[in-house]
Image: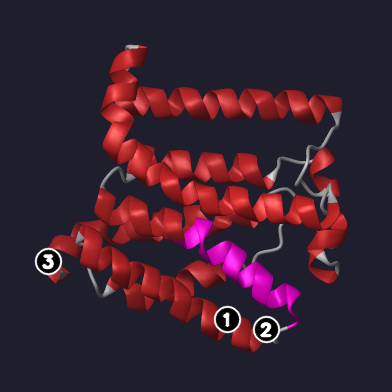
Amino acid sequence: MSDHVELTNPVDLSVGGMNGHLFRRAIHLAMSALPFIYFEWGESISEALGTSEKQAVSLVIIAILAVEALRLKLGVTIFGQREYEAKQVSALAWGTFGIGMVFLLTPTEAYAWPLILSLSLGDPFMGELRRKGMESKNVVIYSSIFIAAIWVACWYWFATPLWLAVIFGPLCVASEWPRLRYIDDNATMILIPMAALLILEPFLKIMS
């Protein structure tokens, strides 16, 4: 994320203004369907492609990165992107990469669903709270509760260890804080929690 983004209204930076901003948010929310597609139809899709499920995921990541490289070479932005993304890897590409890594490294519903939903729902939630002018302290509190609730819901639906909600609510919020020039928070918000989950994974069966 560019250094100046935090001080600027994201709507003003979006190609297409408010409509572009809303489209960007819609794409973010639509990412919530990716675990459903992977776990319900991943095997059928990979068989149709003549690949394994992980190979299919890798091909999608490679294709997205190839398209992104072409876009950067041309220096263009599309509807919904931010102006600064003309010169750096876009949030969409980073998000696709992060979600792809989840499917490659933690391909179980108990882990993939909460990791991806924390990004696809949690990031827009925080962004809109900030855009409305809420104080940072309250953004952190409300967002931590919101994302923890996602992990609790995943405990109910996908048998995610319940105690992880206490850790990953605040951790996912903290993972959005870094303001790195060329790495979007769509990457940090999924890769940092996933790394933590992989570190904890040897102990999950013992503690769940």
Do the residues bearing badges 2 and 1 touch, measured as CB atoms within 8 Å? Answer: yes
Q: Nearer the viewer, residue 176 or 132?
A: 132
Task: Provide the residue span drawn in magenta.
Answer: 118-133
Magenta span includes 198: no
Task: Check disc 2 and report the residue beneath it.
Answer: 136
Expressed as whole percent of the image width and height from the top left, the position of residue 90 reads 70, 43
Q: Which amino acid lies under the numbered mark 3 shown in the image of this protein?
A: Ile
* Count of marks overlaid on the render: 3
Residue 206: assigned label: 3
Mark number displayed over residue 140? 1
Name the amino acid type tagged 2.
Answer: Ser
Q: Residue at x 29, y 39 (%)?
A: 39
Q: Is residue 25 visible?
A: yes
Q: Give the SS element for disc 1.
A: helix
Upstream in sequence: badge 3 or badge 1: 1
- CA separation in Å, label 2 and label 3: 36 Å
